[in-house]
Structure formats: C-alpha cells, structure tokens
Image (cartoon, helix red, strand yellow):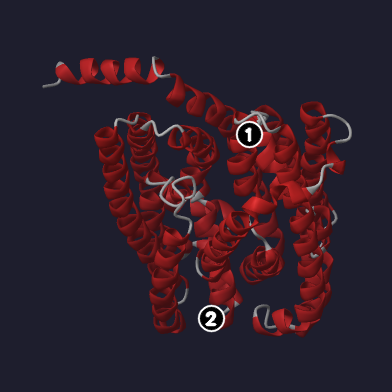
C-alpha cells in the first residue's frame, strides 16, 4: 500500500503538469499566493502590534469601524469585477473590442456612482453605527474618517476585473504587498508614538487608499493599450441589446453580495451589537488565523473563474469537471494540513497577541470547521455565473442567511464569540452542501445534452 502512494501522487502531479488549464490556474494563483502570503505575514504583525497597543476592548472596536464602512459600500456595490471578467472576455473572444471597452466603461461608471452613494450613506449613518456597534457615540468621527477609502475605491472592482482578465496578476500581487507594507509602517509609527485607535484607523485607511488608487490608475493605462487612447469615448448604447442580461447579472451578484454582507461580512457588527467589544476582540484574533487557510486558496477563486468562464463558453465540460475536481483536491488537501497545524499550535499563537487573548483559541476551533469546508469548495458560488445561473447561489444564500441570523440571535447573547462562530460555520457548511450538489447535477445534464445533440 505504501509503495503505491508515491506512484499515485506522481501520476496526479504528471496530470496536473501536462494540463494547460490547471497550470494556468496554478501559475496565476501562485503569483497572487506569493504576494498574499507576504501580505498575510505583515497583516498578522499589524494585528499583533494593534492588539498590544489598544488592548482587547480597544482592538475589538477597530473591526466594527472598518466593517461598518466596508459593508455599506458592499450594499451599494454590484461586484463589477465579475461582470468585467465575464463580458470583456466574451466580447474579446468574439473580436468586438468596442463592446469590451463599453462594458468596462459602464462598469466603472456604475461602480463610481455606487461609491459616492456609499460615502453619503456612511456620513449620514455614522451616529447610528457608533451608538449600536461601537457602543460609543464618540466614534462618529472615526467612522467618517475611514469613509475616505470609499472615494479612493471609486472603480477599483472593475479595475481589478480588467487586470485579472488580461493576466496582470503580478501587478496585483505587487500592489498587495506594497499596501501591507504601508499599513504596517504606519501602525508601527502609531506604536512608537503610543497613539490610540484613531491612529490605527488612519493607518489601515492609508494602506487601502494606496492599493485602490494604484490598481485604478493602472487599469486605465491597460484599457488604453488594449482599445486605444480614445476608448472612453465609446458609446455604451452599443450594449443596448444586452442591457437586460447585464442588469440581471449585476443585480444577482449584488443580492448575493448583500446576503454575504448580512452574514459572513457583518460578523463583527452582529457580535458587537449583541455582545461586547471584549468578545469582538477574541473573535477578531481567532478569525485572523483563518487567513492561514484562506490566503493560499483565495487566489484560485479569480484564476479558476477566469478559466471556467472560457471553458463553459466553449462547452468543454470535460475540462470544467477537471478544473473543479483538481482545484478541490488541491484546496482540500491544503486546508486539512493547515487546520491540523492550527489545532496544535493555536494556544501558543493566540498568546502572541497578549496573555488576555487566551479565550480566542476556543473561538478559533469552532471557526475552523466552517472555513475548511468553504475553502475546499472555493469555487461553489462563482461557477454558477458563467453557467447563466447567477440567481441560484443567491436564493440558497438567502435561505441559509435566514437560518444563520436566527442562530446568531439565539447563541450570541448567551455565549458571545463562540456562538457567532458556530452560526457562521454552519452557514458555510450548508451553502457548500447545496451548491456543490446542484452543480454536479447541472454539469452532468449539460454534458449529456451536448453529447446527444453532437456538441462538445
């Protein structure tokens, strides 16, 4: 048995190496992974310095500030990066450069309008956010200060989608590292000056601004290279026959994003509203360790999506199945190994943030179950977009979100951060089970239809 294992692994490695699809995914993922790994290390140092500077309760106030602003932006956002990848890809493949330029222009304009709307909403709702989530009315100015990132992120999602489609993953990786270095240096300066929460918020804000502005400016340059210097003068009316389809795609991804906003992306807001900054501090430290799981796999979401969109458009179902199966094995194998490492080393790692953060280890263990499942099936939501089924993950997400909210309302007031972690993990597991089951059936049915009709 032991003699057969190396041979099996060797055959798997050979299959991966000889398949250009998975190699492109791994190559581009590797570029982003390298950058994200460095950035993740810097991020952990940022967190450790901020936690020691602010204490458990102060550290627990940081996340609600940033999450409140970010989530209002997500509420108005239409996830234009995915739309850009899908439709710029389609029009480029069909040799329609003017339509490709029109898609990017439309996405950038819509995203910019939503960013201004989000900024207005944050300014107006800041007193509510400070009272409910910070439990401190004096936090209004900090929320409004951090809202500055919204004006810097005017069309950064659209810009990122364009860079992904044209294979500029190296540039995205470099900017990720630079952004983290800027943030770390500024937080280090706050430590030296013995600053407070405002200095830490400003440090995070400046890092985000550097990243967003760099990506946006480079995307404009890239657009000029691909479509000519006058690309922005193309008329979006050329897309009129597709307006209904584009609106459906954008609205579906917005609703899907809103579901995530209410559940996964608002976790510390729920916790701060239903519990205390102390519990948020424990949870924030525990969740920081989830980066060890997520960072290596996250790059595969965008790179796999890029290849899946192309193969599904070509109706190459064998390649689709190969991409999903291989990606799952790679992500799942890594998740198991990293999860075991966190279970063993977790108590020691948590103490790096300070002796008072010990309870975060229990929270970490509960979070780990859900994140490992979500990580393994990292493609489970995005794959439905090129299949022309953007509503299905949304519908599933709404049902699972309702269950998660009920669990949070029941568990969080009683057991704090552990209750929130349990609700979130069950949400991840339930979503993966339903989405993966439906996807397997859908791909099988479409492949059978094409085979019967003489297609690919």
Residue 165: numbered disc: 1
Residue 321 pos. (x, y %) = 33, 35
Q: Residue at x 80, y 35 (%)?
A: 218
The reply, left or right, for residue 360 in relation to residue 59 is left
Asked if residue 304 shows in the view, the reply is yes
> Which residue bears the numbered disc 2?
275
Tell which of 121 and 243 is nearer to you: 243
Among the 4 quarters of the image, the one containing residue 151: bottom right
**Residue lying at 79% horizontally and 69% vertically, measured from the top left:** 117
At 82% from the left edge and 42% from the top edge, which residue is drawn? 234
Q: Observer-nearest residue: 172 or 365?
A: 172
Is the residue 145 above or below the residue 303 in the image? below
Inter-mark Cα distance, 1 to 2: 43 Å
Q: Which mark is residue 146?
A: none
Name the quarter where the C terminus is drawn: top left
Q: Check disc 2 and report its element: helix, strand or loop.
A: loop
Q: Is residue 66 above or below residue 318?
A: below
x and y, in percent, of residue 394 in the image: 46, 63
């Amino acid at each position: 048995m032991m003699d057969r294992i190396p041979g099996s692994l060797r055959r798997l490695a050979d299959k991966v190496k000889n398949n250009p699809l998975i190699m492109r995914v791994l190559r581009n993922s590797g570029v982003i992974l390298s950058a994200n790994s460095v950035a993740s290390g810097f991020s952990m140092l940022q967190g450790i310095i901020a936690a020691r500077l602010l204490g458990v309760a102060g550290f627990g106030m940081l996340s609600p500030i940033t999450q409140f602003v970010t989530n209002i932006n997500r509420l108005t956002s239409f996830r234009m990066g995915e739309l850009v990848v899908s439709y710029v890809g389609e029009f480029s493949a069909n040799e329609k450069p003017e339509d490709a330029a029109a898609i990017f222009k439309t996405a950038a304009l819509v995203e910019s309008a939503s960013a201004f709307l989000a900024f207005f909403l944050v300014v107006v709702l800041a007193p509510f956010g400070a009272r409910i989530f910070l439990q401190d009315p004096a936090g209004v100015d900090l929320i409004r200060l951090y809202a500055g990132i919204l004006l810097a992120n005017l069309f950064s999602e659209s810009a990122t989608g364009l860079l992904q489609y044209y294979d500029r993953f190296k540039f995205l990786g470099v900017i990720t590292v630079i952004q983290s270095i800027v943030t770390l240096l500024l937080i280090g300066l706050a430590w030296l000056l013995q600053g407070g929460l405002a200095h830490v918020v400003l440090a995070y804000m400046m890092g985000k601004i550097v990243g967003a502005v760099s990506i946006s400016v480079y995307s404009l340059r890239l657009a000029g290279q691909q479509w000519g210097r006058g690309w922005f003068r193309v008329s979006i009316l050329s897309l009129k026959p597709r307006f209904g389809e584009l609106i459906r795609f954008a609205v579906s991804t917005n609703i899907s994003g809103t579901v995530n906003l209410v559940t996964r992306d608002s976790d510390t807001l729920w916790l701060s509203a239903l519990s205390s900054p102390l519990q948020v501090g424990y949870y924030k430290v525990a969740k920081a360790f989830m980066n060890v799981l997520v960072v290596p796999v996250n790059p595969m979401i965008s790179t796999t999506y890029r290849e899946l969109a192309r193969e599904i458009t070509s109706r190459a179902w064998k390649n689709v199945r190969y991409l999903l199966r291989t990606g799952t094995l790679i992500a799942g194998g890594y998740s198991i190994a990293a999860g075991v490492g966190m279970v063993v080393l977790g108590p020691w790692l948590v103490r790096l943030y300070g002796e008072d953060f010990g309870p975060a280890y229990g929270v970490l263990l509960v979070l780990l179950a859900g994140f490992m499942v979500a990580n393994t099936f990292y493609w489970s939501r995005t794959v439905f977009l090129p299949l022309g089924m953007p509503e299905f993950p949304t519908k599933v997400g709404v049902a699972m979100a309702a269950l998660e909210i009920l669990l949070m309302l029941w568990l969080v007031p009683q057991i704090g951060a552990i209750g929130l972690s349990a609700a979130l993990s069950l949400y991840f597991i339930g979503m993966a089970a339903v989405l993966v089951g439906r996807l397997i059936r859908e791909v099988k049915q479409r492949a059978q239809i094409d085979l019967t009709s003489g297609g690919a």
